Amino acid sequence: MSFKFERDGTRDGSANCETRIYTLEKTMTSSADYANMLDWFNGDNVEVVLNEGIQNVGGGGPDINNEYMPTLASSPTNINTSLSTNYYRFYRYPTVLGNPNSNKLILIVSGTRSCGRSDKRRSTVTVNIEVFRAGSTLIFESQPSPALPDIFFENELSFPIVNGYHTGNVQTQTSLLPAIVDTNFFNCFSFGNGAESYKILDSIIGRPLTFGNRVTAVAAQDYKRTRRFADITYSGVYNFESNVNKLNEFNLGLFNYKYLEVAFGPIYILDGRETDILVLQEDKISYVLSSKNLISDSTGGGAIASVPEILGTQIARTEEFGISFHPESYVQWGYDRFFTDVKRGAVLQLRGNDLAVISEMGMRTWFRDEFIDSFNTQKLGGYDPYLNEYVLTTNSIELPVPVDCLSCGVAQTFTIATGNTQTYCVDLGQAVGLTTLTYSVPAGSTASFTVSVTYNGVTQTSGAVTTSGSLQFNKSSNSVNESTVVITASNPLEITVTPSCPAQESLTIVSVTLTSVVDAGKFIHNQYRYTAAPFVSPLQSNLITFATGSTSPIVSQYAQVTGAMGSAGIPTAGSSLQIISNKINFDTFDFVLGQDKFRYLRSNTLYPNTSVGISNLIAASTVVSPITGSSGLFSGSFIVPSSGQYLYLIWDYRNSAPITLCYSNTNTLAACCGCA
C-alpha cells in the first residue's frame, strides 16, 4: 500500500498555507482468507499502521493524524475532511440491475484541506494498493530448528592455500576478492516447482535427510603461541612395500607430541640408539623407548610385556647430570658418548648404560674453575680416533642465548659496572599509542649514564645524564611490537627502568551510506579494511538495505563503532584504508563508475544523522580518488589522517539517472496528456 498526501504550501501577506506532506508505504501479509478488502481491513486491524508514515509539516502547524472510519459511507463523498487529519472509509454501491457499479466496494480517502487553487496551495492524494495472490501451488515452509552453536560439518572437498590466498571452485581469493567455495551440500529434495522436502517423496513416513555424527567443534579457548622446549614430535612413516614416503610430513593436526618432563629443562640432544632415543636435557639424562612401550606387573616388579607405540615411556637416569646448554660439546664414537655439564663442573662419558664422570680423575677443581670463568662461552668437543681421546676446548665466543622480551609496564632494576652496557628487549603488545620510558636513580647519585630506546628503526636517547628522567616515542605500528632498551654507565650505576605500555588512542568509525529514493529496497555490501604494512586488518563487511523517504539526502546507514586504534577494524594514523563496494550473493544495486563516490573525513566534530548534519558532513568530506574495479567490485584508498576523534567513511550512492521528461510551454494539459 502506498499513500501520499501532499500540499506544498506557501506564505503571503494575507494568509498562512504551511507545507503538509504525509507518506506511508507498507507491505502486509494477510493472516487469513477474506472475501474483500473491507473484511481484511477490519480483520487484520490495518488501522494501527496508518500512523506509521513520514510527515513533513512546516510553519509550526499541527501534526498529521490518520483515522479509519469503520462504518460504511452513505455515498461516495460521505467522508470527513480536516486540516490535520487524513480519513479512510469504505463505500459499497447499491445493487441495481444494469448499473456497472452495482455492489462495487470502493475505498474513500481524504487529505488535508487546500488553501487555494495554485499548484502550491492545492492538496492532492495519491493512493496505490497492489494485491499479490497465491498461485495454484501453495507451499508451506516449516519452522527451522537452530543448529548447535560452534559446530562445523565436514565434506570431502579440500582446497589449497597458494601464496597466502585461499583457492575456491567458484572464486579464488585475491587482495580484494574473497574465496567462494560451492560445497555441493544439500539438505532437502526439490520437486522442480519451488517445493522442497527433507523426506523422500515428501511422505510422512519417508526416510528423512539427516546429518552424520562426524562433526568438529571449535575450542572455547583462544589460540595462542606455545613454546615446546621439552616435547618430541615425529613425522609420517616410510612404507617400503607400498613405496609411500611420509618422512617429510609433520602433521600438527594429529597432535603427535611426546611430552617429556619440563622440569629437566630444554632438550639439546636427541641420539637414536637401537631400541630407544638418548635424550639430553639441560638437567637430566634420560631414554625414550622407540616403537614400543613397557607394561609392568601390578606390583611394579618389572616389565612383563611391551606394546607397539611410536614413542614410549621416558626413563630418567638417577644421576643429577645433564648437558647444561652446551650441545656443541657432544660427541659420539662407537659405544661412547662424551659431553659436558658446565652447571655442575663435569665432563661425562656414557658407554652403554654406564655413566662415568671423567673430570673427577684428578681434574675436578680445574674444570670447576674453568667452567665458572667461561660459563657462557662455547665448549667444543671432538674425538681423536687415532689416540682414542675425547678432545675438549673452550673459547671466548659467547653462546647465542635467545633474548626474551619483558612485558611493558614492568620495572627492572640494574646494577651496571663502569663502562658496561645493559641491553634488554621490551614487548609493547599490539596496541598503538604514545609510550613513555621512565628511568630513575637513587637520590644523591652523581653517576653519568645514557639511556636509549629503539623502536622500528628509530632511536630516542637521553644523552649523558646524571638524574632521573623519561623518554617518549610513538608506537605507530601494530605489527612491530618489540623495542630495545640500552643503558650505558660511565660510572658504577644503579638504575630502575620502567617502559610503559602504549597509551591507547580510541577512534570512532562512523559508517554512512547515502542513497536515492529510486533505489529503495536494493541491497549492497559495504566493506573496508586497512593496511599498516606488513599488517593487513580483517575485512569489515555490512549488508546495506537502501531506505526510502522524502528527506534529502536519504541515509540508509549511520553506524558508529569505537575502539582502540590498531585493534580489529580500527585503523592507525598513516595507514592505508581501502573502502569497498562489493555486489555479492543476492545484492541488487549496481555501482556506477564515475557517478557513485566514496568519501572520508577525520574530524573532532560529531555530525548528527539529520538533514543538516549530513549535508554539512558531505560538504566537509573528501572524495576518494581514483576509484577502480569492475564486475560489481569497486574500491578506492586513502591515507588515514593523523588527528580527529571521528573517522567518517561515506558510501555515496546518490547517482543520478537521466530520463526524458515531457514538457510544454503552453499549458499543463499539453505537458501531461498531449506528450508522445
Image: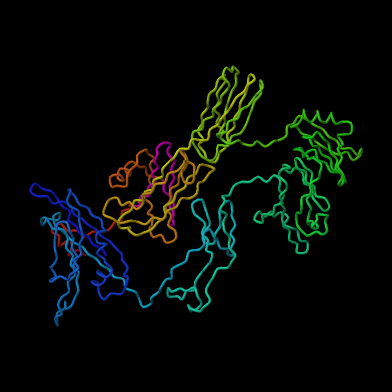
Residue 213 lies in what quarter of the image? bottom right
All told, the count of numbered labels is 0
Locate residue 303 relative to residue 124 in the image: left or right.
right
For the point 10% across and 57% down, the residue is 117
Locate residue 125 relative to residue 547 in the image: left or right.
left
Does residue 632 sit above or below 319 in this rendering? Answer: below
Q: Quadrant of the N terminus?
A: bottom left
Q: Magenta segment: does it hold 645?
A: yes
The magenta stretch is 626-653
Instruction: Residue at the far bottom: name it.
Output: 97
Instruction: Residue at the far front: name it.
Output: 299
Instruction: Residue at the far left: name it.
Output: 14
For the point 22% across and 57% down, the residue is 22
Where's residue 34, x and y in %? 28, 74
Locate residue 266 relative to residue 425 in the image: left or right.
right
For the point 59% across and 61% down, the residue is 158
Where's residue 447, x and y in %? 60, 18
Q: Magenta segment: does it hold 425?
A: no
Does residue 19 sit above or below 44 in this rendering? Answer: above
Most frequent secondary structure within the magenta stretch: strand
Q: Quadrant of the C terminus?
A: bottom left
